[in-house]
Image: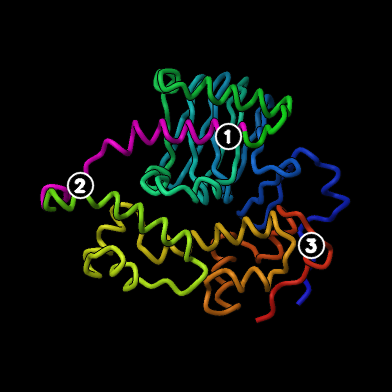
Amino acid sequence: MRRQKLVSDDARRLFPDGYRVLQGTQEFVTYPEDSTIRVWLGETPDSFAPHWHTAAEILMVLDGECQSEVGDTRYRVRQGEVLVMPPRCMHTLSMGEGSRRCLILFETDAMEQMRDFAPLLRAHLQPLHLSAERAQNSGMLSTLNHIISIYRFHEPMWNMQCYSLLFQMSAKLGQMDVLMERPESAANVPERRMISSPQIMESVLGYIGQNYMRDVTLEEMADYSGYSKWYFSRMFRQYAGMPFMQYLTQVRVANIRQKLIHQDCSVAEIYAQSGFSSISTFNRVFKEVNGCTPSEYRTIYGKRRSALDTVDAAD
């Protein structure tokens, strides 16, 4: 089945540094070639209606004040403060008169492949608002300014340099806000298991990362961990911040996105290595997560061949 391209090749060349593509409330963030990060400096008051995107978003206010609404919560972000918006979070953004702000948008696929990123997922479920003092003391402001400088001058390996700094910043926030937390159920778990569980869960995540392309089941992973099915489900959700099947789906979709962007194989070939039981499930789940079909995603983000831009895998 052929579909009309969301972005024509001619239109793409007019905006080499990225542009907004909207379908309803979903925004498809586009990036400079061979990168998955975009820095957008705003010096003219502007506002954006409710929208969401697969990219994470960092708002740094340089002057004045900006506001963002997420659900029933309104965030007032003043000069020197930072708001970290998780991926797929419906939000608005408005700038006050005389304000200046910088947005850093980036895809989190690379981070999601890290074993010890799982505990951080809990911290990414809601926006994180850092006061000016905390942003300064944590080194976040200097890190963000460094990212902006690298992006602006496109130093050699600039995309990798930016992600290196994003990894460092995420690890710092994780140490501050996540890793020091002790689960409420810790007192009810034998000490031996509390010591061994993190290592076991890390091994489980590594196993999933190496075997997601086949039919990995909850029963198999419970056996692998040495726990009962019920206890494994409880421990996995506590450690990863989500149920087992949701995490497995997330890993599969993240790997599909990477292949769509960086490989020239067909969508059907990518499906065959995805771990999904049918092409219809493959297409349906991918669209539920990303808001578009695999072929449309490749059209927007990937290294494309014309034959692959408009053809989806047939059901």
Residue type, label 3: Lys
Please report whichever mark, 2 or 1, sits nearer to the chain's N-terminal start: 1
On the image, numbered disc 3 is attached to which residue? Answer: 5
Please report whichever mark, 3 or 1, sits nearer to the chain's N-terminal start: 3
Residue 35, relative to residue 141: is it above or below?
below
Residue 180 drawn at (x, y percent): 27, 35
Q: Nearer the viewer, mark 2 or mark 1?
A: 2
State the residue lying farthest toward the right.
10
Q: Secondary structure at mark 1?
A: strand
Name which residue lies at 49% across and 72% down: 214
On the image, numbered disc 2 is attached to which residue? Answer: 195
Q: Badge 2: few (under 14), some or many (20 or more) residues near its Cα, within 10 Å? A: few
Q: Nearer the viewer, mark 2 or mark 3?
A: 2
Q: Quadrant of residue 25?
A: bottom right
Q: Secondary structure at mark 3?
A: loop
On the image, numbered disc 1 is attached to which residue? Answer: 94
Q: Which residues are magenta?
A: 161-188
| Mark identifier at residue 38 | none
**How far is disc 2 from disc 1 in space, using C-alphas?**
47 Å
Residue 213, relative to residue 110: is it above or below?
below
Residues at discs 2 and 1 in contact (Cβ within 8 Å): no
Q: Quadrant of the C terminus?
A: bottom right
Name which residue lies at 69% across and 75% down: 313
Left or right, residue 268 beside residue 174: right
Please report whichever mark, 2 or 3, sits nearer to the chain's N-terminal start: 3
Left or right, residue 298 beside residue 124: right
